[in-house]
Amino acid sequence: MLAWLTKKLLSYVMAQNRAGDISTTLRLDAPDMEFVFPGTNSWSGHYHSRDEHRRWLERLVRVGVKTDVDEVAVAGFPWTMTVAVRGRSWWDNSRGERIYDNRFVIWGHLRWGRMKAYEVYEDTEKAAALDAYLEANEPALMAA
């Protein structure tokens, strides 16, 4: 039941992000949250606060990368929960061609419903390939 509710919430949050509204995501972040996006691409980094996460999400929305949830697993108690999310991310160019198509797993830790830390696991080579495409074809979207 808890996993079902969490999936409903995260599906809503990601739908809001796809629509350009990151405020719901930010309301779930603890002020001192940590976010890790591994790899060697323009998205990679270790972010140490809600404000740093906000800037990363603003770029995600500005570029137009979309995300959606497939499955959610939840364990623990409200004061110390672990959540695993399997989902997908994609980006289509202005001609509707699918340039980026990736799968991800988010491993996160919550305290009393606030995201304290999470890391995204995905094919980072695909993120680097998106960078290369944007640099060659949409350089304005490469600006951080």
Image (cartoon, helix red, strand yellow):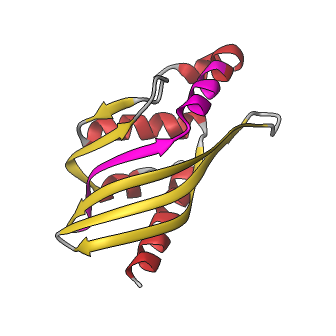
User: Can residue 70 be seen here?
Assistant: yes
In front here: 48 or 122? 122
Residue 107 percent across, percent down from the top left: 37, 54
Can you tell which quarter of the image residue 112 is in?
bottom left
User: Residue at (74%, 33%) from the top-left corner?
Assistant: 93
**Seen in the image, is 3 located left or right of residue 138?**
left
Can you tell which quarter of the image residue 123 is in?
top right
In front here: 22 or 120? 120
Residue 133 percent across, percent down from the top left: 68, 22
User: Residue at (46%, 79%) from the top-left corner?
Assistant: 4
Q: Is residue 68 placed above or below 31 in the rendered structure? A: below
Can you tell which quarter of the image residue 92 is in?
top right
Task: Give the magenta range.
Answer: 113-132
User: Residue at (25%, 73%) from the top-left corner?
Assistant: 76
The magenta stretch spans residue 130: yes
**Seen in the image, is 96 located left or right of residue 124?**
right
Residue projecting furthest to the bottom: 1
**Seen in the image, is 29 located left or right of residue 140?**
left
User: Residue at (26%, 43%) from the top-left corner?
Assistant: 34
